[in-house]
Amino acid sequence: MTTPNPFHESEEAAKARRMRSIVMAVLLAGFVIMVFIVTITRLGGHVADTAHL
Amino acid sequence: MFKTKTPELAPVGVAAAAPARWQDYVQLMKPRVMSLVVFTALTGLLAARVPVNPVLGFVAVFCIAIGAGASGALNMWYDADIDIRMRRTRNRPVPSGRVQPSDALGLGVTLSLFAVTIMILAINLLAAALLAFTIVFYAVVYTMWLKRSTPQNIVIGGLAGALPPVIGWAAATGTAPLNAWLLCAIIFLWTPPHFWALSLYTTGDYAKAGVPMMPVVRGARSTRRQILVYSLILVIAAVAPAFTGLGGMLYLAVAGVGGAIFVGLATILAFSHAGDVIEDQATGLYEVKTGVKAARNLFAYSIGYLFALFAALVVEALAHLPALTL
């Protein structure tokens, strides 16, 4: 049974859209990871510093 | 002040075309230009010769690359009406109809904001300000104004392409000293001979699109003479880092030998007839008729020359080779 295509688009168009979505998801995940790593890098050793608590 | 866009070809991007693939969005960002920008920005970052956290160094160069890509997308959005008239550019995503103009605009604006914001948060304000200026200068001053208005378009507009090493240097140090601007000056002076050599054998395309490139407006002879003048100034400027505490022996050798060849090729071009007959059959940047080979040779060599100059600085910085103190 085939899934109905709500966008009434060709198979080629659906495939292109799916690939764009996948690339966008990967880029967003990469962005989150980059912000996390930059934050840790900028904070440096202060992240683990609990002396002031 | 701003020239209007070509009306008879608008709107672009409405022709029935294949659906946009993700690669089309990459193409909007002009990846070849981005690679040159990454290289020159990295050179600026390393030539500063200060310790840089590798993660932050990577992020700085990444932001500069994304900023360059954003500029490319904005350029392709605005220039779609002239891109469709030129063989070299008519298959770009917007004129070919694969990507809607509004999508290209959205991509350019979003990436610009992303690159500048991350630069502010992760690196420093000076680097971010220089990056923002570069994007605006390329997208607005060059693309929307100079390109369609004056044969000096690529001379003044070349500043946008020349700034990445200064941004890289500012990202590393938070400052932009004379040596950083010297790198900027080298690319700035390199741009006219590089692009005019190309335009000498793509004159027909530019004329058809109504872009006032130097050979179209002033003729081939004047362009060849100006290429020689700019080449002489360029090779002198390119040697200067060896006298300002930036370049070492390797750099001086590359700048000296490379500069002599550059002037040699520019002289051959000046005495040639390249561009006298408007080429209309060339199919690629390197496939040209015999008469314009002198222009093609200088265009191809200029890329290697700039790469060699900056590569010498990178090697000296990575190998901790001392700069000359003359």
Image (spheres, coloured by chain):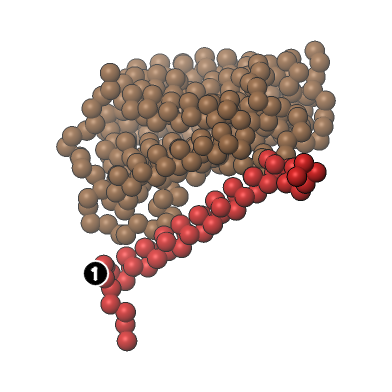
Chain colours: A red, B brown
Which secondary structure lies at badge 1?
Answer: loop
Position of the N terminus of chain B by quadrant: top left
**B263 is higher (above) or lower (below) than B51:** above
- Quarter of the image where one finds residue B251: top right
**B105 is higher (above) or lower (below) than B265:** below
Callout 1 amino acid: His
Question: Hey, which residue is sitting farthest bottom in the picture?
Answer: A1
- Quarter of the image where one finds residue A17: bottom left
Q: Residues within 10 Å of mark 1 (few under 14, many from 20)?
A: few
Residue under the image location 41 percent in, 50 percent down = B25
Residue under the image location 80 percent in, 13 percent down = B326
- Quarter of the image where one finds residue B7: top left
* B301 left or right, relative to B173: left
Residue nearer the viewer, B130 or A11: B130
At which x and y percent is residue A29? 54, 57
Question: Hey, which residue is sitting farthest front in the picture?
Answer: A53
At which x and y percent is residue B80? 30, 40
Question: Hey, which residue is sitting farthest left in the picture?
Answer: B8
* B183 left or right, relative to A9: right
Residue under the image location 46 percent in, 16 percent down = B226
Residue nearer the viewer, B236 or B310: B310
Q: Is residue B89 visible?
A: no
Label 1 resides on the chain identified as A
Residue that label 1 marks: A8
* B135 left or right, relative to B122: left
